[in-house]
Image (cartoon, helix red, strand yellow):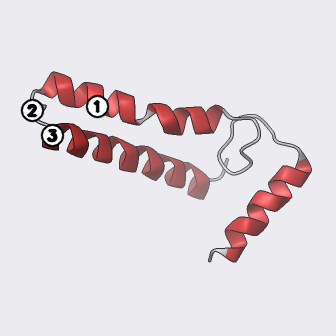
Amino acid sequence: MTKQKALGLLQHYAYAAVSGVVAAYVAGYHTPKDLGIAVVAAIVAPILVALDPTNALVGIHSAPDIVKIGAEAGLKNTK
């Protein structure tokens, strides 16, 4: 994994954690314990994405070449 991919993945986790804390705070949960639980709950989805073997961009396992090519082509078309 390149440094750029690692930073992107870390940024993805940070976005999820911040959005979870904001949602919990707005809902009325203000204690540090409740906000910590919100962080853990928010990063479950990005962790599951990272563990997905078919996710060629951030997956831990190696995906088939055709999936990697399609994912990288899709990423290039969004820039």
User: Residue 59 appears at what percent x and percent y?
Assistant: 68, 40
Q: Secondary structure at mark 1?
A: helix
Is residue 30 left or right of 37 when viewed as pictured? left
- Closer to the camera, 24 or 31? 24
Q: Residues within 10 Å of mark 1 (few under 14, many from 20)?
A: many
Question: Going from the N terminus, do you reach mark 3 or mark 1 first?
Answer: 3
Disc 3 to disc 2, C-alpha distance: 6 Å
Q: What's the residue type where badge 1 is placed? A: Ala
Disc 1 to disc 2, C-alpha distance: 11 Å
Dot label at residue 38:
1
Is residue 64 left or right of 14 when viewed as pictured? right
Q: Secondary structure at mark 3?
A: helix
User: Residue 7 appears at what percent x and percent y?
Assistant: 50, 53
Residue on which disc 3 sits? 25
Residue on which disc 2 sits? 30
Q: Residue at x 67, y 47 (%)?
A: 1
| Position above or below: 45 against 9 | above
Q: Could you tell me if the residues under marks 1 and 2 are in contact, i.e. CB atoms within 8 Å? A: no
Q: Residue at x 15, y 40 (%)?
A: 25
Q: Could you tell me if the residues under marks 3 and 2 are in contact, i.e. CB atoms within 8 Å? A: yes
Question: Going from the N terminus, do you reach mark 1 or mark 2 first?
Answer: 2
Q: What's the residue type where badge 2 is placed? A: His
Quadrant showing the C terminus? bottom right
Question: Going from the N terminus, do you reach mark 3 or mark 2 first?
Answer: 3
Q: Residues within 10 Å of mark 2 (few under 14, many from 20)?
A: few
Q: What's the residue type where badge 3 is placed? A: Tyr
